[in-house]
Image (tube, rainbow, N blue to C red):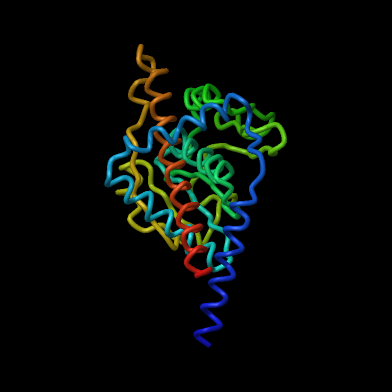
């Protein structure tokens, strides 16, 4: 029985890594591709304690995938207006960039407000295509977002983390603000919970530093999500090499 389990794990890892290594040409929008190509240069600037947390999330992703499950992540902040949306879209982008399949990303808040237009503008400056849709509530509009011309669209809007559009069980919860982290010590349905707070750029709204601070936060989140999936990819390939031996 033990040999069967080991063989199953070995086959699962091999299949995962085959999918990674066979990933074709990256088809992000040109501006987003150029932005993304520069992100690994910032890995060395990530503090060691944050790298450790990112690797812990990466290990959770790997554990899900080796069990032939989708790795589903929900990024949570207080109002689901800025940092959690950035986290969601950069997880999707990093997973695609590194060719790690079976990844799903969602976002939510302890409360709902609206996807902040300043955060949208920062993501657009990075190269995403984001358009307001003619559906939803006027105060909480829904947006269609895309990473590339042939990569499809996905909907983004503010919602509570346990909204029916989000996963209800067997997901990893990434807490990206201190308030949400404190107010939700337990996240119902989550099989992994990780604290990864970011400073809120909203404190610079309507100041001369507004654009700079939103761009800084966007780039920080992007760099850390890319670091996480770079770690996942390398570790899966290493596991494959062990299996081959």
In the picture as drawn, the residue positioned furthest to the front comes out as 245
**Residue 171 versus residue 203 in the image, above or below:** below
Q: Position of residue 142 (x, y in %)?
A: 61, 34
Q: Name the residue rendered at 48%, 60% in the picture.
A: 62
Which quarter of the picture shows residue 131?
top right
Q: Position of residue 42 (x, y in %)?
A: 38, 33
**Residue 240 versus residue 123 in the image, above or below:** below
Left or right position of 131 against 112: right
Q: Name the residue rendered at 66%, 39% in the picture.
A: 25
In the picture as drawn, the residue positioned furthest to the right comes out as 150
Q: Position of residue 29 (x, y in %)?
A: 63, 28
Q: Position of residue 184 (x, y in %)?
A: 35, 52
Q: Name the residue rendered at 52%, 63% in the picture.
A: 240
Q: What is the count of numbered marks?
A: 0
Which quarter of the picture shows residue 79?
top left
Left or right position of 58 against 24: left
Give whichever of 36, 181 is nearer the camera.
36
In the picture as drawn, the residue positioned furthest to the top comes out as 208
In the picture as drawn, the residue positioned furthest to the bottom comes out as 1
**Residue 213 versus residue 158 in the image, above or below:** above
């Amino acid at each position: 029985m033990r040999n069967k389990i080991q063989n199953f794990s070995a086959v699962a890892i091999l299949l995962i890594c085959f999918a990674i290594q066979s990933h074709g040409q990256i088809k992000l929008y040109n501006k987003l591709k150029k932005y993304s190509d520069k992100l690994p240069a910032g890995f060395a600037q990530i503090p060691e304690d944050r790298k450790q947390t990112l690797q812990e999330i990466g290990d959770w992703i790997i554990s899900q995938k080796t069990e032939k499950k989708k790795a589903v992540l929900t990024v949570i902040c207080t109002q689901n207006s800025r940092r959690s949306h950035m986290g969601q879209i950069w997880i999707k982008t990093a997973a695609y960039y590194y060719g790690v399949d079976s990844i799903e990303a969602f976002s939510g808040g302890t409360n709902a407000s609206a996807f902040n237009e300043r955060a949208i503008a920062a993501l657009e400056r990075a190269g995403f295509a984001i358009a307001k849709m003619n559906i939803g509530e006027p105060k909480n509009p829904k947006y269609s977002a895309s990473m590339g011309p042939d990569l499809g669209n996905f909907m983004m809007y503010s919602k509570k983390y346990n909204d029916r559009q989000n996963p209800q069980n067997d997901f990893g919860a990434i807490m990206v603000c201190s308030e949400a982290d404190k107010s939700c010590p337990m996240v119902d349905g989550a099989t992994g919970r990780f604290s990864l707070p970011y400073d809120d750029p909203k404190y610079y709204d309507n100041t001369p530093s507004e654009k700079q601070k939103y761009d800084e936060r966007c780039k920080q989140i992007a760099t850390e999500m890319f670091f996480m999936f770079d770690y996942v990819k390398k570790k899966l390939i290493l596991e494959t090499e062990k299996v081959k031996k």
